[in-house]
Amino acid sequence: MTTYTSPASQDLFTAINLRLSFMKAVALYKATHHQPIEDPLREEIVLNKAKAEAIEKGLNPEQLESFFKAQIAVAKAIQYRHRADWLSLPSSSLPRDLQNDIHPTLITLGSSITEHIADYIRENRALTSSDFDAFNQTITTKHVTDRDKQLLFMALVAIKNND
C-alpha cells in the first residue's frame, strides 16, 4: 500500500535523517580526540536555540525542546553504537573538524528542522500517526533503532502551534 507523503513532511523527515547521519562523524571526532559523547554544555546551547526558534516560528517552545531532547538522546545512542563498532574494527577515516565543520552544519540543520516543523504545522495543524510509515521509511541512518524512531516520532506528533 502506497501512502501519500506531503512535500512538507518529506522535507522534514529528510532533514531529521540528514542531521542524524552526521553523528558518525561526531563520534569519530570525539573518539579520535578522547572526548566523551556526553556534552551537557553543547546540549544546552542546542536546546536554548531550539526554544528561541520555536517562539520565533510560533511553535510551543517546551514541545519543540522535548523533540530536540529526543533527537539528542538518539544522536548520543548513535554515537555510542558507532564507538562500540570501532572497538572490534577501528575506523580508517580521518575525523572532520567538529567546531568548524560539523557543528555549523548541525546548527543549520537544526534550524531547518524547526522551519520544516513550523511549515508542516501551519499547513496541516499537526503530524499524526498516519505519517509514521513515511517517517519510518525516511529515517535510514545506521544505528537508529525502531525504538529510536518511535521516540522521535512521538515527540514530533506532540508539537503544536503556540496558540
Image: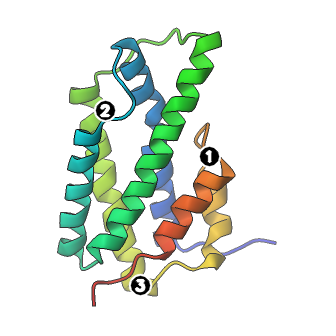
Q: Is residue 13 left or right of residue 58?
A: right
On residue 102, the disc is: 2
Q: From the viewer's perspective, is 131 left or right of 118?
A: right
Kind of residue sitting beneath label 3 = Glu
Q: Residues within 10 Å of mark 3 (few under 14, many from 20)?
A: few
Q: Nearer the viewer, mark 3 or mark 2?
A: 2
Q: CA distance from mark 3 to mark 1?
A: 26 Å
Residue 126 x %, y %: 47, 82
Q: Which residue is mark 3?
A: 123
The reply to whether dot 1 and dot 2 touch (C-beta < 8 Å) is no
Mark 1 highlights which residue? 140
Image vertical order of residue 71 relative to residue 153, above or below: above
> As drawn, which residue projects farthest toward the bottom?
163
Left or right? Give the position of 142 relative to 22: right
Q: Earlier in the sequence, mark 3 or mark 1?
A: 3
Amino acid bearing label 2? Ile
Seen from the viewer's position, the closer of residues 2 and 74 is: 74
Left or right, residue 67 beside residue 86: left
**Considering depth in this image, is 106 or 64 the residue closer to the camera?**
64
Residue in the picture at 26% in, 55% down: 47
Q: Which residue is found at the position 17% from the left and 73% from the top?
A: 56
Find residue 103 and name its label: none
